Image (cartoon, rainbow, N blue to C red):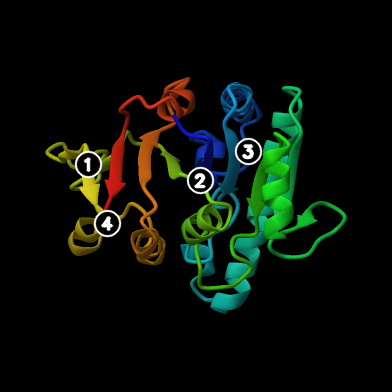
Amino acid sequence: MYKRILLKLSGEALAAGRGFGVDAVFVSAIANEIAEVARSGCEIAIVVGGGNFFRGVAEQAVHMDRVAADHMGMLSTVINAIALQDAIEKTGLFCRVMSAIAMHQVAEPYIRRRAIRHLEKGRVIIFAAGTGNPYFSTDTAASLRAMEIGAEVLLKATSVDGIYTADPKIDADAVKFEQITYMDILKLGLKVMDTTAVSLCKDNNLPMIIFSMREKGNIARVVKGEKLGSLVTA
C-alpha cells in the first residue's frame, strides 16, 4: 500500500518491558519484521527514541539544565540506532544511521538528499539524535523527517493498540478511536505524540497510524493496508 514510510519506535519499546537497556532478542525480532517489509519493496526510514536510557523530561533530569538533559537524551537515541542497525544488517539488508549531531566515527551526518538516495537504493535509514536541537522530542523529529523525505505516512509503533480516551492500562473504561483528526487530539489533550509533532503533521496533512508492536507481523500488516490501530487524518 505504501511506497515510502517513516516508522517511529520508542526507546522503551526496545527495552521490551525491562525499563532500561536494549533487549537483543526483541530488537532482532523487530529487525526481521523491518526486513520483511523492506524486501516487499517499501522504502523504510526509522526514528528511534532514547527513553530506555535517558529522557530529558524524566525525573532523573528534574534538577538538570534542560539543554544538557536533552543533549543526553539525543545521545541515547544514537545508542539505540546503532543497536537496531546491527540487528537489521544481520538480516542481510544495508542500513545507515544518520545523526543530527555530527559524530563521524559512528554515524553519517544527516543530509536530506543523501537520505533520499539511500532510500532509493533500497537501504534502511535510522535517523538518530532527534532534530539535533533541545526542547524538541523524537516525535517531532519523526514528523519533521517524514516530511523532509516525502514519506506517505508516519507509523508510530507503541505498547498499546491505538489511541484511547485514557490510558487503557489504567482506565478499564477507556474507549479506542478507530479514526481521529489532528484537531481532536489537540483539543482532547490526548498523549499520543507531543503537540508540536501533531501540529506539524496537521499543517502538512501527513497521515499517522498509531498501532501496537507487541503482536508479531504488525508492521507488515499496517504497510499492506490492514486496518490496525488508530488512523489520524485531517
Looking at the image, do the residues carrying marks 1 and 3 touch, with CB atoms under 8 Å apart?
no
Name the residue that disc number 2 marks. 10
- Vertical placement of 25 versus 202: above or below? above
Q: At which x and y percent is residue 137?
A: 50, 62
Q: At which x and y percent is residue 176?
A: 19, 38
- Vertical placement of 114 versus 14: above or below? below
Q: Could you tell me which secondary element the residue under label 2 belongs to? A: loop
Name the residue that disc number 4 marks. 182
Seen from the viewer's position, the closer of residues 149 and 211 is 149
Mark 2 → mark 3, Cα distance in angstroms:
12 Å
Q: At which x and y percent is residue 177?
A: 20, 40
Name the residue that disc number 3 marks. 22
Q: Amino acid at mark 3?
A: Val
Mark 4 → mark 2, Cα distance in angstroms:
21 Å
Mark 1 → mark 3, Cα distance in angstroms:
32 Å
The number of numbered badges drawn on the structure is 4
The nearer-to-camera label among 3 and 4 is: 4
Looking at the image, do the residues carrying marks 2 and 3 touch, with CB atoms under 8 Å apart?
no
Asked whether residue 104 appears in the rendered view, the answer is yes
Q: Amino acid at mark 4?
A: Tyr
Q: Amino acid at mark 2?
A: Ser
Q: Could you tell me which secondary element the residue under label 4 belongs to? A: helix
Residue name at image x 57 percent, y 49 percent: 47
Residue name at image x 59 percent, y 44 percent: 46
Residue name at image x 50 percent, y 39 percent: 13
If you read the primary sequence from the N terminus, does the residue marked by circle 2 or circle 1 appear first? 2
If you read the primary sequence from the N terminus, does the residue marked by circle 4 or circle 2 appear first? 2
